[in-house]
Image: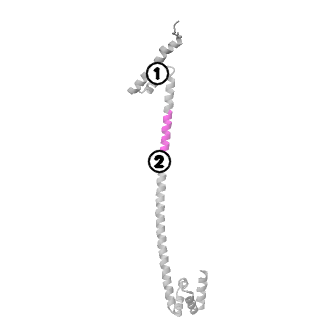
Amino acid sequence: MSNEKEYSKIQWFFFVIFIPTIFAIILFAVILIFLGVDLKDKAKEVGGNLPLIGEYFTEKEAEEEINIEDLNETIANQQAQIDRLERELNQKEEEILKLKNETALLEQQVEVQEESVAEVRHDLKEIAKTYEAMSTKNAAKILSELPTSEALLHISQISTQARAGILAKMEPERAAELMSKLANQ
């Protein structure tokens, strides 16, 4: 008896023909890849020439072309949107800069006005000290000659005691007018 097994025809086909052929194809493909040949394009070209299989290769190319066109259109739309948004951003930045400049200008104006008000208050206090330093009779004559609004500003800065003396020396109608307006302030 011999220990050798007999192989069936199918096994013999796989061992002798099929497996070595697959191995040779794989080895040949690896060698071509190392040589720089693009197997994918070659396979599409050869597959496109085959009668039944060729239809599948050409349809995929058409689908890829459609997809590429759609993608290019999407890219163009997105680029247009990016450009529009960049323009809007630049406009907003210019508007912000304009508003900052306007704010700085308004702050300067407020500062100048505050300085002006401080000067006026200082001047009014100096005038009040002058009225307090002179006699009540002379101060009453001067305040009687001033317009009511100015007289009111001046008398509001004078101390209560000096104010009482000056108002006592004024004509009663004028003193009453100044007192009522001073009370309403």
Q: Which of 62 and 156 is in front in this view?
A: 156
The magenta segment is 66-82
- Quarter in which the C terminus is drawn: bottom right
Magenta residues, dominant SS class:
helix
Query: In the rendered view, would you say 127 is above or below 60?
Result: below
Residue in the picture at 48% in, 49% down = 84
For this orientation, the residue located farthest to the left is 35
Q: Give x and y (percent) for residue 54.
A: 49, 22
Q: Residues within 10 Å of mark 2 (few under 14, many from 20)?
A: few
Q: Give x and y (percent) for residue 144.
A: 54, 89
Which badge, 1 or 2, comes first in the chain's sequence? 1
Q: Which of 91 and 39 is in front in this view?
A: 39
Residue type, numbered disc 1: Asn
**SS class of the residue under badge 1?**
helix
Residue 182 image-quadrant placement: bottom right
**Residue picked out by circle 2:** 83
Q: Does the magenta stretch include residue 141?
A: no
Q: Say which mark, if any, is on residue 49.
A: 1
Query: In the rendered view, would you say 40 is above or below 119?
Result: above
Q: Give x and y (percent) for residue 76.
A: 48, 42
Q: Nearer the viewer, residue 95 or 7?
A: 7
**SS class of the residue under badge 2?**
helix
Q: Label 1, label 2: how many angstroms apart (C-alpha)?
A: 46 Å
